[in-house]
Amino acid sequence: MDIRAHVSMVFHLDKCIGCHTCSVACKNIWTDRKGTEYMWWNNVETKPGTGYPTLWEDQEKYKGGWEKGKDGRIHLRLHNRPGGLANIFYNPALPNMDDYYEPWTYDYENLFNAPEGDDQPTARAVSMVTGKPMDNIEAGPNWDDDLGGSPIYARNDLNLDELTEDEREQLNEVERVVFFYLPRICNHCLNPGCVAACPAGAIYKRGEDGIVLLSQEKCRAWRMCISGCPYKKTYFNWSSGKSEKCILCYPRLESGQPPACFHSCVGRIRYLGVLLYDADQIEAAASVPDEELVAAQRAIIQDPFDPEIIAAAKKNKISDAMITAAQNSPVYKFVKTWQIALPLHPDFRTMPMLYYVPPMLPVLAKTKDGTYDVEGLDKENFPAMLSSLEKARMPIKYMASLFSAGNVQVVEEVYRKLIAVRIFKRAQKVKDYQQAEVDAALASGKTNAEEVEAIFRLTSLPTYEERFVVPPLGREMAVEAWENPLDRKREAGFGVRNKIAKRKF
Amino acid sequence: MFDNALFIGFPYAAVAIAIAVTIYRFWFDPYSVSSQSSQFLENRKLFFGSVPWHYGVIIVLLGHITALMFPGVWGLFTANQTRLYILEVIGLSLALMATVGLVLLFYRRMADARAHAVTSELDWLLLAVLLLQVGLGFWVAYYYRWGSDWYLHTAVPWLISLLKFQPNTASVAALPFWVKFHFINGFTIILLLPFTRLVHVLVYPISYLWREHQVVIWNRSRMN
């Protein structure tokens, strides 16, 4: 047993309003430099949709993540070791800038400097790569936002593959149109594909907190990480010739603040906390059959209250404060205690440490004689406007394709519990349910009143401190052991090419 | 005198500067060491340029180095006419492959707006010098046949004399202009290596063959 701590995340999709505040917070801090304009370490996608970069989930095309070989072990989909070296002169699975979009700005100066003429001057779009005018802008980071262009984008969502032709057609009916938002950052995986794919060994996982970082000094632009990550969350800086990725705002974490995208989240959908896991089990857990992947990933996460685990953690030099943080972790509750948060695409076998509570989309409704009418209302016991799984607007198979490697049962169990929470709370506040109905909902959700109240509390009324249990990494103190942390204050930063002289005053 | 400057002074100076600057760069500016790939910006033309160029030039270069390191074995190998024929044909085709690939890469940097935007003056210089070198190499191999054999008795003794610090230009003094040009341009490339993106040949990640798949770094190990 090799117990390690991991700063992990939960995104509650029911609360995401798709405002992109997280993306903008991240962009303003980390990716406003030359070469990074097209990067969105945090992006928000509309689902169904093809996402950013387009069709990133298509591993036939991009060869990201791991696949289970005939020998029962997992192998990088991208290459074996000699193959990686042989493909170094041309990576066949590398996405091109056009798969993201060519970043542009506008020639605003022309509005002021244009010579007098018959026409109003315009601000033409100008490429931020070449500086040349871009008359035909064909893509952007959220080009298919809110189902924009859905005949091209939403219809090509790979997760719809499991649906029957009928089900797919129905999704296009105006009355049935449905979508939700999927905010994505680096998953800081337990079995990262980017780390394994990097020929230079420039990418690494921090032992203390599991954050995956990319050494700018060791990166040699072999660009295998971009293909190796199945989530397309490593990006190539075309100007510096280095790959870059989400750093989970570790400088903020180290000073006790949540990452900027978490902090700025308007819908308060984000939770951050520590998970304890057993590093010895990673390879085995990533190698189980598809339908067992979620269970295996849950099993690798250890109980921070178990004395045996605590002893093993202490033996691994995990501090008491870190263990306390793990015990208070909201992520542990969502993922392990309540089991209502699921990893995104566990089928990529990288064991992502960002978990999603799937969204409860409203039940299907149609207008009938000019009024809003919930279909089949009279035949069901549930009152209008409340979700029932059988009436789910988005087929459950779609959610299973996203969150459980196709295992419908796992997603159903999550939804049954979420529905039980709703019915329980509605019975309490609105009082339009019979006790028998509430009990039935609790039983089918395999939950109880106490757990439901706890889920409700952490979902709807959590305080800042309950959402973000930032462990005391204390590096601002620990670092003093070998250097004065104030030495280079205000003098260096991301992408600085040469060491900068120390400040004199 | 002129020969001494070209075939003794210049090679030593080029190599000395290359070694010093390489050490300086790796020590003081490791961030700058990158292959500066532009595949992300343009990848269709790159495929037809980069793959033939790299495979062509690497194998040809390995041939040059093998002959220099094992002249005896190489001499025995080329002593047979059939083998010599095969070697010449392979060498010429690889040189042609590399040349065509490099011309394509040159064209790509000029014609593609995005690739052009990330090409520095040093990149252009490097491209020109490399193109000149493979062009000269191909020319020499074509017009002065059996290079894989006469190389052993001309350039190799001279290079070995340089390596032994007993410089002797006798074996190369009488060679035709184009051959000498090829030699000197070769050392120009060595001189340019640490100043340009060519430095990436020194960091070819061979250790990927045996390193652990997952890399974990502990901060606390720095403190212990």
Image (spheres, coloured by chain):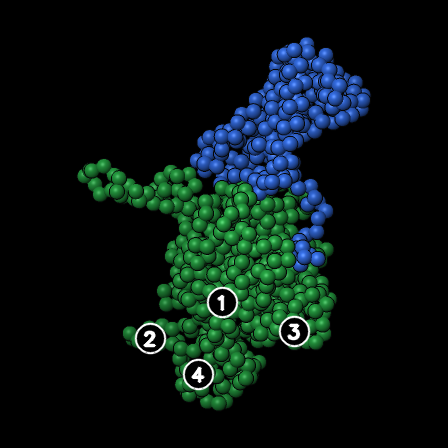
- Disc with the residue nearer the chain's start (2 vs 3): 3
Left or right for B70, reference B128:
right
Determine the colour of chain B: blue
Dot 1 surroundings within 10 Å: few (below 14), some, or many (20 or more)? many
The residue at which mark 4 appears reads as: A426
Cα gap from disc 2 to disc 3, whole angstroms: 47 Å
Neighbor class of circle 2 (other Cα within 10 Å; few <14, some 14-19, many 20+) is: few
Report the mark closest to the observer, 2 or 3: 3
- Dot 4: element: helix
Q: Chain of mark 4?
A: A
Query: How far is disc 1 from disc 2 in space, using C-alphas?
Result: 33 Å
Identify the residue under disc 2.
A372
- In the rendering, at what x and y percent does residue A384 appear? 40, 80
- On the image, the x and y values in percent for residue A465 come to 51, 72
- Secondary-structure class at tag 3: loop
Q: Observer-nearest residue: A22 or B112? A: A22
Label total for image: 4
Disc 2 marks a residue whose amino acid type is Tyr
Judged from the image, the secondary structure of the residue bearing numbered disc 1 is strand
Please tell me if label 3 and label 4 are on a single chain: yes
Mark 2 vs 3: CB contact within 8 A: no
- Label 1 belongs to which residue? A270
Chain letter for mark 2? A
The residue at which mark 3 appears reads as A303
How far from the left and from the top, in percent, is residue A181? 44, 63
